[in-house]
Structure formats: C-alpha cells, structure tokens
Amino acid sequence: MAFFEVHNLSRSFGGLKAVSNVSFTVTKNTVKSIIGPNGAGKTTLFNLISGFLPPDEGSVTLETRQLEDLSPDKIAGHGVSRTFQNLKLFHGMTALENVMIGRHTHSRSGFLSGMLSLPWTWVEEKAIVKDSLEVMDFFGIAHLADSEATSLAYGQQRVVELARAMACKPDLLLLDEPAAGLNMKETAEMGKLICKIRDKGVTVLLVEHDMSLVMNISDEILVLSYGEKIAEDSPLAIQQDKEVIRVYLGEDDA
Amino acid sequence: MKRLRHLHIVYMALLIVGIQVVTSATDTAYFLTQLTMSAYYSLIIIGLSLVMGYAGQISIGHAGFFAIGGYLSAFLTTYNLLPYQETGIVAFLSNAGLLVFSQDIYGTDLLTVHPWCAFISAIILTTSIAYVIGRPVLKLKGHYLAMATLGFGIIIFRIVLGSSYFGEADGLSDVPGFPLIGGVEISGNMSARIVNYYIAWGLVIIGMVLLLNLVKSRVGRALRSIHGSEDAAKAMGVDAAKYKLHTFVLSAVFAAVAGVMLTHYNGGIGPSEASVMKSVRYVAIVAIGGMANLWGALIMGSVLNFLSLRGYFGSMDDAVFGSILIIIMLFAPQGILRKGILKDLRNKLTGNPEVKQS
Ligand SMILES: Nc1ncnc2c1ncn2[C@@H]1O[C@H](COP(=O)(O)OP(=O)(O)O)[C@@H](O)[C@H]1O
Ligand SMILES: [Mg+2]
C-alpha cells in the first residue's frame, strides 16, 4: 500500500478538463515533483488534494485515510500541509504569529477556555511559541520573528510561509512553486531547505518551474500537460523522454 | 502583554469608581442612570466589535438579538400564568420552583416565570436563533452578509411590533427587577441607582476581560488569521466557518444579556430597541472605535450612547449615527481610535495614493 495515492482524479471547469484522470503514488520520505507548462493543471491538482476544490471523481488516500470528501481544515488536521503559488501570508500579523497558526492543529484551547484564560492554556500558548520559534530557527528566520510578515522581503516571505506549513508537522507537504519570484541564490537556498525538510522525514510533493531545482532534488517527476499525466519517472529518464521534450519545446518558458 | 491588559482593566475600574464619587459629591447622581444604560449598550458594542474587527464579518441585525433577549425576558416575567395554574406544564414549572407569585400595583395576583429562568430561556433562544441564522448567512460575504443580517433585524422588528403578546407599538412594561445575590436587584429603583451603576459596569468589566482574553488566545489568533487570509487559515487547519459562527453566536449572546438586563433595569422594552436604526448605530460605533479595537469600541460605545441618552443630539439622534457611519467609511474605514490614523487621514486628504487598504 502506497504512502500517498491519487487515483483517477478529475476536475473540469465548464468544458475545460483542468485535471483529467490523473493517478500516481508517492513513496514515504521522498520528493516527487509535478511539472508541466502553465495551465497544465498543477495548482488545480494541489487544490483537489488539499480540499480547496471537490473532485468530479477519483480518490486521494494518505496511508489508509480517504481525503477527497474532506474540507481543507480537516485535511490539514490529517497531516497534509501546503503553501500557495501566490504567497498567502496573514497580513497584520508578525512572522512568528504566522508560524504560530501552523501549530493550530496541534493545540486545542477553544472559546471557553480562551475567554476564561484557564492556566492550561498559558502552558499551551508557551509551547506554541517555543515550537514555532524552533521551526523558524530550523529555517534560519528566527531573527525575523517580530517583524510584520507581509513587510518582509519577498524571499523571506516565501521562507515564512514554508515555516508556517512545517509548523503543522505534516506527513505530506505540498509546495506550489516555492521558488517563483526568487533569484538564483535564493532558489538554491530554497532547494536546500526542501532537502532539509525531506531529511526530517516529511514527504514532499513539489510543483516548480525551475528545472535545475527540480532535477536536483526530486526522487521522481510527474509531467502534466492539459490536465493529463504524460510521463512519470526518475529525473534522468524524464530529461530524455521524447513526449516531455516535445511538450516543453513547444513552450517558450518551461 | 498580559500585565498591560489587566492594567487597563484596573484603570477602567478606577474611572468607574471615580465617576460615581464625583457625581455623588456634585449632586449629579442623575447622570448615573444614563451611564448605567450606556454600560448595557456597550456590552452589545464590544461583542459586535469582535465580530466586525476580529472575525471580519458584519451584522446589521444586532438590535434583533438585543430585542430577543429583552422581549423574551419581559414577556416571561410579566405574562400572568395564574389562569393556567392547573394545566400540566404550568403546574410542573410551578412545582419545580421556576415560577413566582407576586402582586402588581393594583393588587392583582400574578404568577410569572422567575427572572433567572426567563434569563436562561432568553440566552438559550438567542443562541439557537443565532446558530440557525448564522450557519447559512455567514457563508455570504460583504454586501450580501450585510443585507441578510439587516433582513433578520427587520423580521424581529416586525414581529415585536406586530404581536399583541409583545405589546405592539407600546412594548412591554411593569417588568420586575432582576434579583441577584443578597437582596440586590437590577431595577430602576431610585434607591438602588448607585448599586445598579456598579452592577452594569461590573458586567462590562467581566465582558471586557472575557473578550480581551479571547482575542489574545489561540482562538483570537485563528480569527485574525481568517481575516488575514481565509484560504491560508484553512490550509493550516483552522475551521473558518466554525470560528465565524461561534464568534457571531457569542456576540449575539452579549447583545441578549444586555437586552435582558437593560429591560429589567428600565422596567420595560419598546419596539424601537429592535429597530434597524439601532443596529446601524451599533455598527457605526464599532466602526468609529476602530474595527479591531475592543477598547476603542468600549470608549465610543459608552460616550456616544451616554450623549445620545442625555439627549445631546436632540431630534438629530439617528442622523448623527448615520452620518458617523458615512464619514468613517469615507475617510477612515479602519476607525478613528487607533495608531496611524493621522497619517492615513493626511494621505486621504492630500490624495496620496499610498493609503494602506488592508
Ligand atoms: N477556479 C477556476 N475556475 C475556472 N478555471 C480554472 C480555475 N482554476 C484553474 N482554472 C483553469 O484550469 C487550468 C489549469 O490551471 P492551473 O491548475 O492553475 O494550472 P497550473 O498551475 O499548472 O499553471 C487553466 O486553464 C485555468 O485557467
Ligand atoms: Mg499553478
């Protein structure tokens, strides 16, 4: 039984088949990349997996749990965390507070205990701060803790979002173009961070346009084109796949 | 942070005592009546501030929740059950000690629901209604949410205005006092004016402490995250719909508690308490206080309601609050009582485009 399995997943918008009959599995503790031209359906696939869109058909299974009918917050609670292609940080909150939200599923103070400020909630709150700072330290951004997240440099914001997603202590992490908008040095840094995440035992599903990054850190690559899976193999084999080359040569920006 | 929060509460308590001492010393204790009433109104305001400022929702129907609390309590504590004394449910309630015998001013015997029992019924009813309407309504956004809550407010207004049980245009009167411990009661009794002032503001302090705690808690952070980016909040496991709904219900309960208590204090309630203009007034006060600012809402809530109750706005009363709302929305949508307001205003007036619309 695969650690993570997507089976026959489909989703259309009107007549457009954004994701069409896509199936694949991901082995625990590996990095699998999904590549494909703009509009291939990569983000839609992530939205289907993370519950932001209901699939027309198909199933999504993490270990033994069916995810396809669950809401995003429930899916997060079952150990699937994600970042967004267009950064979605919480404005008006510090970087630390952003990361602290990542601890939400691992804490439980509710309306009543919060209003009454029961002593156990102070203990919990302290633990949330400590865990969040640890994650920020892991990504080398602990010094940014008190800055307002959305006022940070773009590259730093990407890392804060990554830290927030990791604060959930996910089993599966979905990264939607984490290097988009980063310069070469920052992209290389991002690659290192993703490897560090994998080394922590997290399984990573990565959508990325930067081919050198993808080829360097992926264990396996899946290629999407017009919503369909056209190839799935090791990075080396993908680089030589005729169909993939054809799809990419037809594109200006790969 | 925590110390600061509690320090403000201490200042507030000192101010409350100070005002009472000054009014007593200067023979202006009659101010206490309106100050007591504005305390109850402030309870609605701080609850609504949570909904608007922290959960990022709007409700133009909170006068409806106030009215549900006030009217239900007024009805239950004045409706004479004596003729039904022998019938099943009334007999049962009577045996359970939930009813009280009394006499009205004409010496007629009355059998009515005990105020505490009426209070609990009012809270249960408000909670249920808030859940039932909140669930579908909070899925709406922006104007649609505003319209839906407005519609709810209008329905409640029509019900209390049109039902003979609720006294139609006259409302309900002769509502008894609300007994607390040790013979103290919430009532408009002149001799209990000072005590009632402290009871009302004591309730506001309790309300503030609860909400300030909440805002600083895990739930408060989750609410702010929903405000910051709802998608990201969901992706982090925050059940946005549930949090919005609970916040809405909580604020409805605050409004209902205010409605019950103010009705017992005033000895009655009239349909104007359920009117749309009342709801608009509450929204305007939260807006001017600075959306995500409980203290701002409290200060504006007590000051503006006090001025209004003293009649300083004269026949322009509703117009004043309507204008406040318009001006705030035009020039300072984030409210007045907050940091950075002067800079924003200057930018607005000089047409500087770098105004932060977050
Ligand atoms: N919410 C939506 N409504 C309608 N069409 C959509 C929606 N989301 C994506 N699409 C369409 O689905 C296709 C796949 O988009 P997307 O998944 O964003 O591609 P990618 O991430 O691979 O660039 C595109 O043609 C896009 O226009
Ligand atoms: Mg995309």
Image (tube, rainbow, N blue to C red):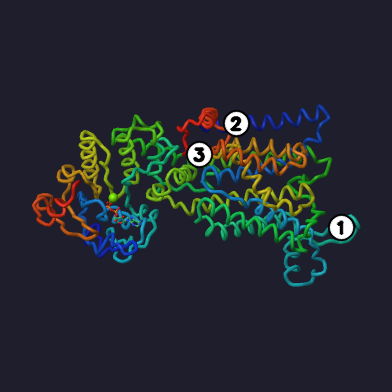
Label 1 – label 3 distance at C-alpha: 48 Å
Instruction: Name the quarter showing ligand 1.
Output: bottom left
* Lateral position of residue B329 relative to residue A22, left or right: right
Q: Which residue is mark 1?
A: B103
Q: Amino acid at mark 3?
A: Lys
Mark 2, Cα crowd under 10 Å, few <14 / some 14-19 / many 20+, is few
Mark 1, Cα crowd under 10 Å, few <14 / some 14-19 / many 20+, is few
| Residue depicted at x 25% and y 48% | A202
Q: Position of residue B126 (x, y in %)?
A: 63, 56
* Lateral position of residue A31 relative to residue B109, left or right: left
Element marked by disc 2: helix
Say if labels 2 and 1 share a chain. Answer: yes
Of residues A108 and B78, the one drawn nearer to the viewer in this rendering = B78
Q: Residue furthest bottom?
A: B87
Of residues A24 and A38, the one drawn nearer to the viewer in this rendering = A38
| Residue depicted at x 56% and y 48% | B58
Tell me the mark number nearer the camera, choosing from 2 and 1. 2
Disc 2 chain ID = B
| Quadrant of the rendered image containing residue B324 | top right
| Residue depicted at x 72% and y 28% | B18
Q: Which residue is mark 3?
A: B216
Q: Residue furthest front?
A: B351
Label 2 – label 3 distance at C-alpha: 15 Å
Q: Is mark 3 within 8 Å of ligand 1?
A: no
Q: Earlier in the sequence, mark 1 or mark 3?
A: 1
Label 2 – label 1 distance at C-alpha: 45 Å
Of residues B221 and A48, the one drawn nearer to the viewer in this rendering = A48
Q: Which residue is mark 2?
A: B8
Mark 2 vs 3: CB contact within 8 A: no
| Quadrant of the rendered image containing residue B162 | bottom right
Q: Amino acid at mark 2?
A: His
